[in-house]
Amino acid sequence: MIDIHCHILHDIDDGPPSLEKAIEMLRAAKSDGIDTIIATPHFNSTTVPVISLRRSELSSHALQCGIKLLTGCEYTLSDFSAELEKSILVLGETSFVLVDLNTCSIPQFMEQLAFKAGLKGLRIILVHPEKLLTAKSLPGMIELHLHGVFFQVNAASINGKSGRFPQIIAKKMIAAGICDYIASDAHNMKNRHFEMKQAKSCVTTLFGNDAAETIFELNPQLLLQNKEPESIAFKRKSLFSSLWA
């Protein structure tokens, strides 16, 4: 599997504090079926200058674990808006960028921001909205999806480790065909680890193998090819039926 959102670079944000802890995370990722990680530290003025250094320090260890290590960044919505006219750190060598809403509602300017990003050749992936938004926001999320904004759900949310309500929203997003990616958002080996294998098993059980393969395998592969994710919206009716039957 490809993990498109992971805080595995050491001594850079709230991820592992040392190289040794980052190596532990690499081994855990490999055991969880992950062969490619896009390291996405939180954006701030001190993060950007050291991302390439931290990657170079970890890359040889990643190769020893059989993991390809790429980089990107996780922006808050306000930081992304402010940095849009400057240089944006994308995922790998693609045009995709991770953005955290960092708010409990969808801002009215979100569609306009997505349009401006598109003019810059960028495509937004909103990260873990299931942890922030309620079911009332589902119509708004569906509308954003129609306007080319993509969504990434956390594996821990699928598995119920982030609480009951994020799990409910995550499943409803899959049922609505607007969950494009599931990633670990892993930070450490204590309380925020990978859980991708368990999440894939859960999605397979609830929604079928095709949906799980699309979200966990195909769409991340398409991302690395700089292609938009394949939608499971064509299965929406059957998915809703299976979820609420």
Image (cartoon, rainbow, N blue to C red):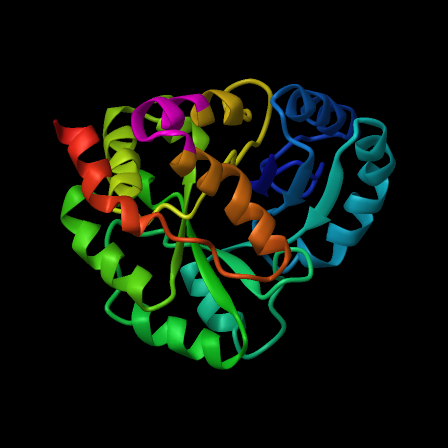
Q: Is residue 135 magenta?
A: no
Q: Picture coordinates of residue 135 (x, y %)?
A: 17, 43
Q: Give the residue displayed 53% in from the left and 45% down from the top.
A: 218
169 left or right, relative to 96: left
Give the side of residue 34 with respect to residue 113, left or right. Answer: right
Name the quadrant containing residue 227.
bottom right
* Residues shaded magenta: 201-209
Image position, residue 100 (x, y; %) = 42, 52
Q: Position of residue 176 (x, y in %)?
A: 24, 46
What residue sits 68% from the left and 43% below the top? 12
Q: How many marks?
A: 0
Q: Nearer the viewer, residue 144 or 185?
A: 144
Q: Residue at x 52, y 33 (%)?
A: 184
- The chief SS type of the magenta part is helix
Task: Report the front residue among 8 and 121.
Answer: 121
Vertical placement of residue 36 versus 197, above or below: below
User: In the figure, residue 188 lies in which quadrant?
Assistant: top right
